[in-house]
Image: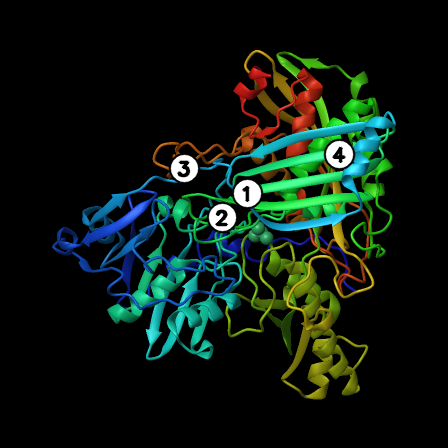
Amino acid sequence: MTATRARPRVEGPLKLTGAARYAADHRPDGVLDAVLAGAPVAAGRLRRVDPAAALILPGVTAVLTAADLPAFPELPPPSAVRVMPFSDDRIRYEGQPVAIVLAESVEAAEAGRAAVVVDCEPGTPVLIGHGHRELVMSEDRGDVDAALASAVSNGGIRIEQTYLQAPRHHHTMETSGTVARWDGGRLTLWDAVQASSTVIPVVSAALGVDAADVHVVARHTGGGFGAKGYIWPHEILAAAAARIAGRPVSLHLRRPDQFSSVGYQPWMEQTIRLAATAEGVLLGLEHSVVNNTALADTHVEPATEASKSLYAVPALRLRQLVERVSLNVPTPMRAPVEGPGLWALESAMNELAAAAGLDPLDVRLANFAEVSPADGRPWSANGLREAYEEGARRYGWRSRHQRPRRDGPWVIGHGLATCTMGSFRFPGASRVRLHRDGAVVEANVHDIGTGVQTVLTQIAADELGISPDQVEMRWGDTDLPTTGPTYGSSTTAGTGSAVAAAARDVSKQLAELGQGGRDPLEALDRAGIDELVGEGTFDLPGGAGFNADGQGTPYAMRTWGVIFTEVGVDPDFGLLRLRRAVGVYSAGRIVNPVTARAQMTGGIIWGWGKATMEESDQEPVSGRWLAKNLSNVAVPVNADIPADIDVSFTDEYDEAASLIGARGIGELGATGVDAAVAEAVHDAVGVRVRDLPILPWKVLAG
Ligand code: MOS
């Protein structure tokens, strides 16, 4: 049985000493640097690319255009795009790649890019908010119209509000990038990704090579947050360019390319209609979601999932729509799905409490779902009620208004919201090799900064009954056993279970050798064996490749929590300060409280950034991203973050969710924070902001 134990990060020394090598740190012999040249307009037609001025610059070796590149087929998921750039002469967004400059150095390639003449016939860009929407998903349960009507006639409450959020970019410290080298027909990619095994089918389909001939190495990934989850065109273009050049190619996105050549969280408009009794008990819920997507590619942000599964609501109407605009395609961003969904739903629940004159906590308790509202299955485990109670106790929620309401210029407000995410599960495999001096864990996970190596090492050590110091981890290479991706808050539960199974396989083999029950290293020695290899898998019912809600099992699975925030509002300037936060989470067993706390604290800070700072705008005339650098990007810094962030977990072991009792944590902490902050602002100064981020002018305008 795996213990809960704090352990320092095993990859920490590699990062602190600079020994951790990221994708672009790989410089195979003869490597060329590649820089993308993009369309200068957001709409129109490409007339001509003139490389002449670039080709005479020192160090520039080639400028590749559509004429040089192979014809790409339509690509399957998890390619982020269906239609590769270079496929036709239509310009669909500013920055759309139209040429690849190859050079002997990054500097020469940059100079070449600046000299390439891109001639476009400009068109009229399509802007966010034009109002033409396509319905992509709908779901109905019960009669929402009847619920809304009866709420009015029976003295109940109706809430109808629209909640907006701005687009946001992931801004990983390491921009996305790929180094490609061909050895005959075999391709090696050093790639900045969150799911390297899924690169292979996309690249092999795009380039017409055998999947067995593609090898991806991705050990350290400098932040992902979803930006490196799907497969993006630059990964394919790096490989295509290397094949044409006959030399390895390093295509590392420049910071501005990061805005247009990978994804972002879309602009979203969500409308919620609630019908409830005077006691705040929900009778009906309508949740309609619109997100922007690209002209040729479709990303749906399924924010209605939150409304489907959180509260016990008899009548439900869910709609998902998209609006196509002249921007690149969006993608999931920590926390996708329920993250945006709870901004709307939990804001509306807070408005319901205010309208009913009830404590927002009591409204949550009144609508607690004893079983899954989606299909009536029992929960695999659900500590949400305990989380509400424990969080309220730690925060002092019930006595909040007896404390001082002012501190110097700051008017103090309090808010809360429920947190929830689907429990994403992906199948995968792992291997544990036991040697006389220790064990080696092999699993193709990635290090995106979560501490996954530490946790997997710890799981293997505990299963084998040896010290974690005697366990080494090999990760980040598609030659290792294939695991689920390093996203979706899924890795500890899924790959952790595969590692535990592999370690148990080793123990079983030792027992079969008559060496059970003793120190495994000593046992190996006694048996005169140099190495025992254990294999383990984590499988889903029916051999499914993914599920989010315990599909195919007798149990519904989700993760839950509650976030309480204390916010100071300066009523003269509209400034906001996060003074205190208390988060309590129900997420299955916590393997390592240090890395787990770091995940949740990071999520809460991420949520504060979403609530009060982050916004990427589409420029309203040219249709391009207004800013394409970091100089005006506001994200929380240390000075914005109070020391008093109190994170805890309910004590759980969820044996239905995974072999190790874990469900998933990473993104849960980022949910609910925006709605709790908006509620705290309202509590402080009576202004209800329904448009994220909550900037000072919006507080003052209220
Ligand atoms: Mo996260 S959007 O699952 O990297």
Rendered location of residue 211, percent (x, y): 46, 76
Which is nearer the N-term, disc 2 or disc 3?
A: 2
Disc 2 from disc 1: Cα separation: 9 Å
Q: Which quadrant holds residue 192?
A: bottom left
Disc 3 from disc 4: Cα separation: 39 Å
Q: Residue 330's mark?
A: 2
- Residue at horizontal 40%, vertical 51%? 261
The quadrant the N terminus occupies is: bottom right
Crowd class of label 4 (few under 14; some 14 to 19; many from 20; radius 10 Å): many
Pointers 2 and 1 in contact (C-beta within 8 Å):
yes
Q: In screen coordinates, is 43 left or right of 605?
A: left
Mark 3 = which residue?
630
Crowd class of label 1 (few under 14; some 14 to 19; many from 20; radius 10 Å): many
Viewer-closest of 18 and 628:
628
Disc 1 from disc 3: Cα separation: 24 Å
Which is nearer the N-term, disc 3 or disc 4?
A: 4
Seen in the picture, residue 230 relative to 504 is either above or below; the reply is: above
Pointers 2 and 3 in contact (C-beta within 8 Å):
no
